[in-house]
């Protein structure tokens, strides 16, 4: 399968990532960005390789920043060959090789700063986590360039890990407090066909959550947690994975775990894992997910809290957690073609992920709140994690290279192919090629999605091909329709689990039209979400909208949208590089407050125009207030 | 002036304080309450006196818990003589005398646990703060019993402080990070007529906020603060007091400072202090006060944040801060008779103070939120300070004895007398006696306030007395009326600054009727208070109301009150010991959510009865949700 994005929405973002973000982040990793928080991540490898003097600087998982950057660059080389960039990657990969210890170990923090702590802190040490990101990078680089060097380095490391960890006596029986190695080993297995890597991944998953827990009891490998928010559930280690029915703890960790479980469910055809994942999916997406697809509402321990606790202004909703949800969703779609996975993947990609990066690709949000009052957020102790403007880099810089690797690999999320069934999950103009029963099938998709829901797909094939094409019918769409060669399809009859499946003999020139009419939708929230009571959110197609101070003035919470007011959608080339803007009339309090704080109700309102922009685009103009959930006057 | 409460609202609460709370707290201070957090406060004095072995336990200001308890007991002896209680107080006062050092110093923490740190930590050491509370207790005990022993102990301590601190060279030029000594020295001056005490109080106030600040710069006395929320403004030491135009920092500290400033403004007739206080009053009450009169919205550093930042569910609103606001308000009324002080004193007393103690007098809130969801509050890191039920005691136990001393001295807050003008600020049935130009004037007030606004005052006097009687006309009242001996008074003509002033020759048997009709008021909040947008609060007379889960079921945030719905008030003897309950019809979402988190608006509502109880009474039944601000359907 090969997919080339040619659309006006994602493709410029991918291009910007390649042209702006990747070079920018390389500078950041080398501390060449003025005013950005220091990284030192590349220098750590030089010191570890003995080519520089100095001390380690950064988080214990600083290596993973470089790994994710290499992975992002590697993906980009697949669709955008760039010899200069490839030379930079070659150099850093060579450096990593020189930093590798003779036994295969590769981690700059433990090699430079804490050699006696190697494999001593599985709770918070992040060694296997870093190894996982390096493996993902190595696999991506191998798949894009065919170069084996980095892959060989990481196979040596994986072999070493496989020697010292596992179920045999004399091996360390542990797993990493931060999941990541598990899904990376599956990728390494796919790239190398080495069964041991897959088995080691399964071993880590099966060990996880066994009680009594070494993470809590064994001072040699783990040790007691710092406070109750960092207890076993923080690591998804409170119960064996199949017995976990609710998503708990650190939200990024949870997503990486579930993604790996889905990989293993597929690899081993393990229905018990799939069943566990269905429950977890249901729990996350119907109890603990923001409308933007953001997850993990609490800053302290970056974690899930309790069902329906989704505060908007103190929301954590880390960009990495949104990315993790995309990763999990895409893997669930490989397990079973169900629109609930595709719908959420679209929701989080277009909203909670995309908000993490500025329009110019060089400014980032780690935390993605759904409501911001800058004066309050700048002051409040419980909002210290909230940034009211995207920033150039972070001391803990997991998110920027994570979004870069997602965007440069975005082409891999559009389709899945299962034998003679090809399913399209996301919509954007693209040219894609598939091999079906030895023949090549080409699809050319044209659309202005997400600004317009008309999608046209033309087939090219040398010979007619008997296969099924499935198209996700988004749950946000009330009146979808479809034609093949101008002939209407009875969608009620062919849509199953959110996908319209057309099984036929396809011929060259076949023409599919899928129309997903987009209208302004007002969305209400389950009444158990206290924070959203009395409020609605605006959606247009897959996009969640927000009000910004730039368009609506300050005190956004004062705006009320009458239930019967008209809202119109119009594409505006002049706004934020071209977006659909939603407009209507709202109500505000009359400015007749004379310094009082409280008074008997007067309910004096005045009509004001209001204007909403996609949540993903917020914070790209003058800094100010932002709000997704808008008070409604019923 | 002598006031005896005989009403059905306050008097039982005062009696309960005397009969239940004071004995209970004595047990708590002696660690005799099972399940309560340890105190050790009395034991610390025994250890300091050399009569017990052991080590100091508790906060550095643990002594002040005993001091406030003695003060509460002392006030109670004034109106409820009790030889057994007096004997207990005599014993603890004797113990304090034995714990006093030969130079006059008296502080168990520094004497027992940190003798070398005496007068070394003015920022957080609380030495002068503890001295202040001991002085207040000694004055109260002297005034109630005429016994000088404790007063003499504290004069020795004050004399010692006055010797070592002050403007002379060789003296320590410092002031306490936690204000309290300043207002205590004014009381000591009034009790002893010693001018030095008043001058020392003024010295502390004048030194405060001078820059450069010893609290920040001088490691010998102060030292740098821990974080930005504990910076100089935390101590109200960021500027000289007359230049402070906004209320900043720790809210209890701020209140105690402003109270002392008001005392000194009066004592020295210092209009510059009064002018500064007017600005601060305006700032606190129109920008940073909850509708309950609670202040200090942030738990971290127990402090004010920024204007209009008044979150309901994470509110700190410490009981002590509310008490401090009562203290400040009552002193402002001595400076100038203005209804804005009386109105706020009433608001905070009937709501934010009274919520701090249970109906039975033995359970306390330190933190007084305006909205509680137990499941969320029990989990969330940023709500750790919120207790969803009153508790028997606190490790930091400033609030329980503080509310006890307020309630046993409540009689002193009702009237002020300025020459031949007597002003009544609060309403409750009472018998009061005044000396006016050498004659005695007795007032007998009868009312069912706050359940009913009819107030009848009958005068007794041997001879006619020429004087002015002023009555506060609460700003919550829309249609006040008044008669003297059956003759209506033209209120528009005689009300000035919120007080109806009647100046005449009063005769025995004169009969004043003041009618303050109470109706259910819906109160709206300044639109700049984001948290209250779209919501109203219910008030009835001086009482702010709330919804409780007990009466309205869970998910209180789902309730909407139609703007045009009727609300009725009825006295219900069977509810919470007898209260006015507010009832009406509200709307709730229909329970047709099938596991979704978000959906296109359906706005399906169903009518439900709703019932509100006074905020001060919440949390006295089955634990559950509570909300003051209620969504309104306009």
Image (cartoon, coloured by chain):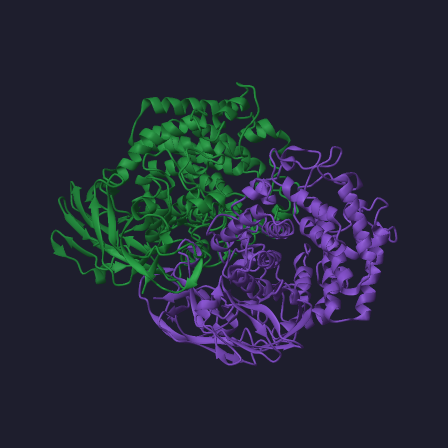
Chain colours: A green, B purple
Residue A622 rendering spot, x and y as whole percentages: 34, 39
- The one of A66 and B602 positioned closer to us in this rendering: B602
Residue A506's x, y, as percent? 17, 48
Q: Relative to A286, does residue A112 appear above or below in the rendering? A: above
- The relative height of residue A340 versus residue A94 in the rendered view (above or below) is below
- Does the image show residue A115? yes
Q: Quadrant of residue B203?
A: top right
Q: Nearer the viewer, residue A456 or B547?
A: B547
In which quadrant will I find the N terminus of chain A? top left
Task: Report the residue that reaches farthest toward the right.
Answer: B51
Q: Give the number of marks.
A: 0
A131 horizontally vs B621: left or right: left
Q: Could you say where residue A589 lies in the image, as x and y percent from the top left?
A: 34, 57
- Residue B143 is left or right of residue A396, and the answer is right
Residue B504 is drawn in which quadrant?
Answer: bottom right
Of residues A67 and B213, the one drawn nearer to the viewer in this rendering: B213
Identify which residue is drawn at 56% across, 19% down.
A53
- Furthest residue in direction left, as rendered: A486
Pick whichever, B92 or A94, lies toward us.
B92
| Residue A497 seen in render | no
Query: What quarter of the picture does the C terminus of chain A occupy?
Result: bottom left
Where does the image place residue B36, in percent across and percent down from the top left?
A: 71, 62
In the rendered structure, the answer to whether residue A568 lies left or right of residue B492 reads left
């Amino acid at each position: 399968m090969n997919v080339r994005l040619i659309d006006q929405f994602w493709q410029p973002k991918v291009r910007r990532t390649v042209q702006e973000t990747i070079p920018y982040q390389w500078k950041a990793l080398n501390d060449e960005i003025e005013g950005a928080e220091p990284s030192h991540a590349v220098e750590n490898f030089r010191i570890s390789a003995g080519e520089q003097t100095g001390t380690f600087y950064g988080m214990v998982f600083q290596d993973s920043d470089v790994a994710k950057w290499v992975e992002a660059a590697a993906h980009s080389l697949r669709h955008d060959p760039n010899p200069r960039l490839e030379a930079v990657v070659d150099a850093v990969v060579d450096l990593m090789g020189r930093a590798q210890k003779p036994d295969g170990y590769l981690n700059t923090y433990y090699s430079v700063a804490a050699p006696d702590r190697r494999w001593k802190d599985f709770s918070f040490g992040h060694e296997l986590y870093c190894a996982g990101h390096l493996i993902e990078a190595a696999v991506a680089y191998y798949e894009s360039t065919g170069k084996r060097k980095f892959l060989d380095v990481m196979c040596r490391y994986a072999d070493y890990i496989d020697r010292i960890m596992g179920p045999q006596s004399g091996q360390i029986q542990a797993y990493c407090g931060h999941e990541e190695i598990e899904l990376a080993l599956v990728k390494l297995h796919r790239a190398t066909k080495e069964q041991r890597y897959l088995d080691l991944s399964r071993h880590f998953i099966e060990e996880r959550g066994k009680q009594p827990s070494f993470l809590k009891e064994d001072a040699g490998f783990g040790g007691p947690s710092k406070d109750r928010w960092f207890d076993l559930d923080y690591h998804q280690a409170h119960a064996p994975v199949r017995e976990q029915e609710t998503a708990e703890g650190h939200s990024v960790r949870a997503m990486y775990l579930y993604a790996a479980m889905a990989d293993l469910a597929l690899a081993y055809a393990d229905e018990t894992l799939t069943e566990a994942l269905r429950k977890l999916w249901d729990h996350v997406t119907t109890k603990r997910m923001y409308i933007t697809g953001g997850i993990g509402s609490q800053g302290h321990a970056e974690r899930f809290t309790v069902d329906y606790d989704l505060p908007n202004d103190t929301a954590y909703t880390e960009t990495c957690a949104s990315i993790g949800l995309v990763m999990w969703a895409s893997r669930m779609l490989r397990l079973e073609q169900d629109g609930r996975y595709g719908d959420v993947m679209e929701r989080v990609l277009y909203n909670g992920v995309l908000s993490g990066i500025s329009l110019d690709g060089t400014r980032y949000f780690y935390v993605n709140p759904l409501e911001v009052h800058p004066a309050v957020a700048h002051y409040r102790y419980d909002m210290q994690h909230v940034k009211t403007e995207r920033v150039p880099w972070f001391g803990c810089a997991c998110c920027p290279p994570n979004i870069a690797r997602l965007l440069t690999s975005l082409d891999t999320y559009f389709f899945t192919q299962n034998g003679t069934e090809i399913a399209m999950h996301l919509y954007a103009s693209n040219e894609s090629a598939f091999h079906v029963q030895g023949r090549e099938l080409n699809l050319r998709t044209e659309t202005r999605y997400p600004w317009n829901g008309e999608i046209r797909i033309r087939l090219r094939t040398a010979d007619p091909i008997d296969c099924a094409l499935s198209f996700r019918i988004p749950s946000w769409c009330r009146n979808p329709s479809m034609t093949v060669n101008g002939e209407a399809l009875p969608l009620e009859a062919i849509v199953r689990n959110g996908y319209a499946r057309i099984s036929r003999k396809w011929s060259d020139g076949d023409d599919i039209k899928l129309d997903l009419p987009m209208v302004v939708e007002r969305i209400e929230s389950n009444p158990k979400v206290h924070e959203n009571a009395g409020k609605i959110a605006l959606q247009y197609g897959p996009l969640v909208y927000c009000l910004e101070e730039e368009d609506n003035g300050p005190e956004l919470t004062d705006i009320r949208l009458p239930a019967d007011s008209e809202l119109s959608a119009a594409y505006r080339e002049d706004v934020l590089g071209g977006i659909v803007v939603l407009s209507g009339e709202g109500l505000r309090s009359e400015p007749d407050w004379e310094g009082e704080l409280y008074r008997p109700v007067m309910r004096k309102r005045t009509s004001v125009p209001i204007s909403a922009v996609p949540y993903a685009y917020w914070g790209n103009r003058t800094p100010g207030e932002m709000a997704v959930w808008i008070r409604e006057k019923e």
